[in-house]
Amino acid sequence: MAAVPLVALLGLPRLPPLRLVALLGAASFGFPILAYHGFTLAPAAHGGVMLPGTLPFLTAALGVAFLGEAWTRRRVASLAVVAAGIGLLASDTLGAHPGAWRGDLLFLGGSCCWAVYTLLIRLWGIGAMQATLSIALWSAPIYLPIWWFLLPSSIGAVSAGAALYQLVYQGIFATVLAGLLFTRAVTALGAPTTTTITALVPGMAALAAWPLLGEPLGPIGFLGVGLVSAGMILTVMRFPSRAR
């Protein structure tokens, strides 16, 4: 629904059928289905670490395998710093739920799907608006009948206010706006820089959980947040070239 006004203004996105199916499979179905099911098996803190935390490494690996990208020394160093920070943050937030590994595997699968989506839009040179509208427009007609007739649902017990909130947040902000901004960032900054910036999400979520959810962050977690931030800064900073 959120994409309909944009389609009326800009027209239908036109992608070859096979490319459309690939984008929908990765971003519209693979990522959300695996991620949301993972939240039923593991705490939200696990998803906050696993989903954005593993994305820079999966995207970098796909770039090497399919785009022939070389890993510079600074790229390796920044990923190593981010990995250390994610590891410390994970040890501070994941250790209390040792039986949640099944959900963690689903989170990893969801991150893989989003890394594939990132690879495809770069490989095929798909514009941000075209990719976002394709995902937002065609996923609902495919998934809604399956969900309505075949899958269990408790939507009847949800209040109208909660349903409206999810419509606005998930439909407009999470799908259209965030999807457009992420895809545009990938085309403007490149996938390595964009996905490394997303590694800040676990730390930001952990910091916000302290005042909002009463979940304090320990010293190891704070150190992890600092390392992730340092790794991101190492990636996005542009150092002046040395004079010869």
Image: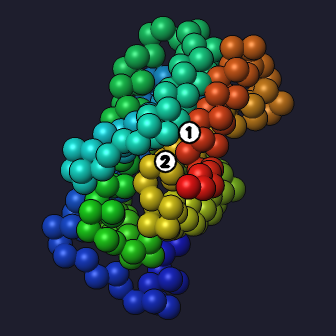
Q: Secondary structure at mark 1?
A: loop
Rendered position, 20 above or below 8: above
Question: Callout 2: 10 Å neighbours few (<14), some, many (20+)?
Answer: many
Q: Horizontal placement of 192 versus 58: left or right?
A: right
Q: Quadrant of residue 102?
A: top left
Rendered position, 63 above or below 209: below
Q: Quadrant of the C terminus?
A: bottom right
Q: Residue at x 60, y 41 (%)?
A: 234
Q: Nearer the viewer, residue 134 or 184?
A: 184
Name the residue carrying label 1: 199
Residue 50: image location, x then y, percent: 48, 30
Residue 120: image location, x then y, percent: 28, 59
Q: Residue at x 59, y 24 (%)?
A: 85
The answer to whether residue 187 is seen in the rendering is yes
Name the residue carrying label 2: 195
Q: Horizontal placement of 1 versus 168: left or right?
A: left
Q: How many marks?
A: 2
Q: Where residue 159 is drawn, which disc sits there?
A: none
Q: Residue at x 61, y 32 (%)?
A: 228
Asked if the residue under mark 1 is in contact with the one under mark 2, i.e. CB atoms within 8 Å, the reply is yes
Q: Residue furthest front?
A: 244
